[in-house]
Image (spheres, rainbow, N blue to C red):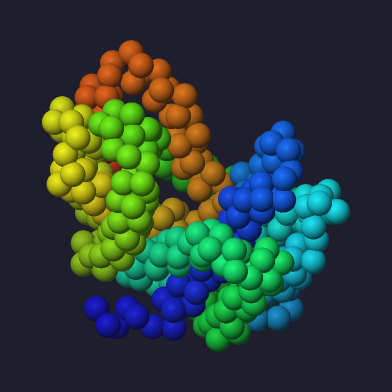
Amino acid sequence: MNKFFNGRIGAVLVLGFSSGLPLALSGGTLQAWLTVEGVDIRTIGLFSLVGLPYTLKFLWAPLMDRFVIPIFGRRRGWIALCQMVLIGIILGMSASSPKNALWLLAILAFFLTFVSASQDIAIDAYRTEVLKTPERGLGAAVSVTGYRVAMLVSGALALILSEYLGWRATYMLMALILTLGVLAVWLGPEPEYSGVPPASMKEAVAGPFTEFFSRSGVWSLLALIILYKLGDAFAGSLTTTFLIRGVNFSVGEVGAINKGMGLAATIIGAIYGGLLMARLRLFNSLLIFGIFQAVSNLSFMFLALVGKNYPLMIFTIAFENLAGGMGTAAFVAFLMALCNHRYTATQFALLSALASLGRVFVGPLSGILVDEMGWTVFFFSTFLFALPGLILLLVMKQVVIAIENETVKEV
């Protein structure tokens, strides 16, 4: 296993951290700053719109496929540029004031999410191209780990530090921490093959679609991307509400176990799953981890049947997050395997956006199902929602195996 812990994995880990750090600084942490400074609730609500670039990043991803920054290579150049701009924006936010320059802070927060989303595009492309096939599972796992740790640093830790250092000093410290990403770009290896950039913007925009939709079984692939984690998304959409309202655990208990231990279990599951993938290969990993995800939803059903029970709650949260972490590692590796290196930035952005559709639409439907059927039947239904993706995966076994066995794809 030690052979997988190398410079490529190390760079992906730190860049995952760099990717996750700006998120809370334009989201929950900024919201807390505005609240403490007495900004009215309607304005705070409007600030949530600054996160829009994260959902639309595929629109400008072709630019990052087409053009190359003349330092550090095709992908690392874009990452380095985004990181330097992010550091400047965060420092600018630290010098702003919700009381005296609210709209300047809003503009800076919007640009923070735009540049952060652009960094995500470049990091996703770099990770896809730099990792060798056996490393993809572990690479996806350490990237998720770095991302989650960074969210804690810029979220929970930043809120704690703000009480001692103040908001401006806290944001300045976050900008300083982001320099770790610059170091990773500098020391990180260049991919052995990162693809030839598209010859024109027309090709950069149309090429990713033309290439992808020219593949056999493309519609089944798209369906698999949407369905694979659908059951997991359904179960996770109302977990917190279920634990508080459905089985009457306190908010503090839910925070400590569901959020704290759940995060640790997700990280452990992702890393363990990533290591297992080198032995199991892609198809077997997707199938076995997908089954674990589906079965883990049934543990919530048993908790709903039994009622408030601490040991069962701890087991349920641990099992669900371990399985989810393993499934995420395999799924991200699958998305990486689908990308043509000529169009990695655009194709990964599009495929990941497509994968998130399930999470977007299950929330409203979940509430209706719980209201109509109750918690026990709801969680059994989330197990059933996981089955179509697994069945489709079995049908597409040879296609998925062929995708993993392909050499680097070129147009």
The residue drawn where x is 66% and y is 50% is 36
Q: Which quarter of the image is occupied by the N terminus?
A: bottom left
Q: Residue furthest bottom?
A: 187
Closer-to-camera residue (181/150): 150
Q: Is residue 314 visible?
A: yes
Closer-to-camera residue (145/242): 242
Q: In the figure, 36 relative to 22: above or below?
A: above
Res. 374 image quadrant: top left
Q: Across the whole image, how many numbered discs are drawn on residues?
A: 0
Q: Which quarter of the image is occupied by the C terminus?
A: bottom right
The residue drawn where x is 86% and y is 54% is 100
Is residue 122 left or right of 404 when viewed as pictured?
Answer: right
Q: Position of residue 18 (x, y in %)?
A: 56, 69
Q: In the figure, 262 relative to 299: above or below?
A: below
Q: In the figure, 126 relative to 102: above or below?
A: below
Res. 145 image quadrant: bottom left
Is residue 293 left or right of 406 when viewed as pictured?
Answer: left
Q: Residue furthest top?
A: 372
The residue drawn where x is 32% and y is 78% is 4
Q: Is residue 117 visible?
A: no
Q: Position of residue 125 (x, y in %)?
A: 55, 63
The residue drawn where x is 45% and y is 29% is 363
Q: Position of residue 223 (x, y in %)?
A: 41, 35
